[in-house]
């Protein structure tokens, strides 16, 4: 069996499962946020049950519109807060929180071998830990909160092998953008993507989270990495409960096996209005920008901020550009402060925000006006994603986003570090 099949079989109480099979699966963690959980809570009330299946495995994170930007967002957050107090479930308050897909692994709430059902499409992020994590609708999450189970079809698995050592400034964001550019936004519809190869072995955990995060942009159900020494080192000290490591079998059957030599890969840029509209940064063209955003569940981790600081140190953001930097969690923010990264950003004339999803979904903290262009480390660049339908969003990794903020146009880091 593949890695996804191994995990799903174990959680369905079966010796093996096959792609296309319909199964009930035990969930280790059920998660919702301030957009999706209010709907789930309302549906939960209709089920006729009074308690969630396990308060310590139901996690609610207000992160999209916090600190509350208006009355409706305040009421949504209050609904989560009140439900969590009533149920005794896990809840993260402003000042002790972060973006859901950053803090759940960071705090050891998601572990290798888990099945995670989240009311957010980027729940697939946790596949970096060797977990099967997938986004679901709020009604499904209501049932999962009540029963601790989810119903799904076993997905086929696409194995992707990356050969070679990555060049400087190229990381997980570039690998996943390149891959989406190769297979398209529908190239992995309802499939699990299993990542392997020399380039993957050398990736940091932060880059692995980035890659797993964006498999949904290829239409995938989940994205998974095998557990290795880096995974175990990350989990060590974070895990507060037992977990099981699963590995794919050597004779596992895959729907496809794709292989890429990435030893000469450039930093990648996704042009509007699709994550599959990919070009190497050297071929992006002469594109002036108005805003740069560095953060989100895709690239708001400490490693991402370190890369941005490398580029911004001793430089200044172009006077025609707003550079907004958003640490993914309070812990990331604190460590960035200790390392002097925040001072580097402020001296470069960047704005640093409290942890929030903020501008990624057009929420707040950086909405675009008509005609404006933004380069962003976020995950989607659809029409109107970050504000006006007449604005444009370009996706890239933190090195390109920081360099572009300095240059005032989309460039690679080498251009501003000459």
Image (cartoon, rainbow, N blue to C red):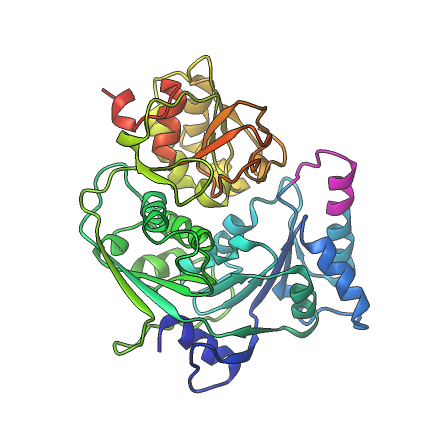
Q: Is residue 260 left or right of residue 285?
A: left
Is 256 above or below relative to 1? above
x, y (%) of residue 227? 34, 64
- Residue 352: x and y, percent? 52, 27
Q: Residue at x 69, y 61 (%)?
A: 89
In reply to whether residue 72 is colored magenta, the answer given is: yes
Q: Residue 358, percent across and down?
A: 59, 36
The answer to whether residue 63 of the structure is visible from this angle is yes
Tell me which corner region of the image, top left, top right, bottom left or bottom right, holds residue 414. Answer: top left
Q: Quadrant of the C terminus?
A: top left
Give the total of numbered labels: 0
State whether residue 213 is above or below residue 190: above
Of residues 329 and 39, which is closer to you in this image? 39
Point out the residue furthest to the top here: 319
User: Height in image: 183 above or below 73?
Assistant: below
Residue drawn at point x = 45 percent, y = 35 percent: 272
Q: Position of residue 296 (x, y in %)?
A: 50, 41
Magenta span includes 44 = no
Residue at the far bottom in the pictured view: 15
Asked whether residue 228 appears in the rendered view, the answer is: no
Residue at x 40%, y 32% (from the top left corner): 339
Q: Nearer the viewer, residue 178 or 273?
A: 273
Relative to 367, 168 lies left or right: left
The residue lying toward the viewer, choosing from 379 and 283, is: 283
In the picture, the quarter occupied by the N terminus is bottom left
> Which portion, as a residue range, is magenta?
65-77
């Amino acid at each position: 069996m593949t890695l996804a099949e191994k995990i799903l079989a174990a959680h369905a109480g079966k010796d093996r499962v096959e792609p296309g099979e319909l199964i009930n699966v035990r969930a280790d963690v059920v998660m919702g946020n301030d957009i999706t959980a209010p709907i789930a809570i309302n549906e939960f009330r209709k089920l006729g049950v009074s308690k969630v299946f396990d308060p310590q495995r139901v996690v609610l994170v207000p992160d999209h519109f916090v600190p509350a930007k208006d009355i409706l967002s305040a009421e949504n957050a209050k609904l989560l807060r009140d439900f969590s107090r009533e149920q005794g479930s896990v809840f993260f308050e402003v000042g002790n929180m972060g973006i859901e897909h950053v803090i759940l692994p960071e705090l050891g709430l998601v572990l290798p071998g888990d099945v995670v059902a989240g009311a957010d499409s980027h729940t697939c992020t946790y596949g970096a830990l060797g977990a099967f994590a997938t986004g679901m609708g709020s009604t499904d999450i209501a049932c999962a909160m009540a029963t601790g189970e989810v119903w799904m079809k076993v997905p086929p698995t696409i194995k992707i092998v990356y050969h070679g050592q990555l060049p400087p400034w190229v990381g997980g964001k570039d690998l996943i953008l390149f891959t989406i550019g190769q297979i398209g936004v529908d190239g992995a519809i309802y499939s699990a993507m299993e990542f392997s190869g020399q380039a993957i072995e050398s990736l940091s955990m932060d880059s692995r989270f980035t890659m797993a995060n964006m498999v949904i942009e290829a239409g995938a159900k989940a994205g998974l990495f095998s557990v290795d020494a880096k995974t175990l080192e990350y989990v060590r000290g974070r895990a507060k409960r037992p977990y099981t490591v699963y590995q794919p079998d050597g004779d596992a059957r895959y729907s496809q096996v794709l292989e890429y030599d990435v030893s000469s890969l450039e930093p990648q840029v996704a042009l509007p209005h699709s994550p599959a509209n990919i070009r190497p940064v050297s071929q992006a063209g002469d594109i002036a920008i108005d805003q740069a955003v560095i953060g989100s569940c895709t690239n708001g981790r400490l490693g991402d901020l370190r890369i941005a600081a490398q580029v911004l140190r001793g430089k200044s953001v172009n006077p025609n550009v707003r550079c907004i930097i958003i640490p993914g969690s309070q812990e990331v923010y604190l460590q960035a402060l200790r390392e002097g990264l925040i001072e580097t950003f402020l001296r470069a004339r960047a704005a640093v925000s409290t942890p929030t999803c903020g501008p990624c979904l057009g929420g707040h903290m950086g909405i675009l006006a008509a005609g404006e262009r933004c380069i962003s480390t976020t995950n989607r660049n659809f029409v109107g994603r970050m504000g006006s339908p007449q604005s444009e969003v370009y996706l890239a990794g933190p090195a390109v986003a920081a360099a572009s903020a300095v240059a005032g146009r989309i460039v690679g880091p080498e251009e501003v570090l000459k």
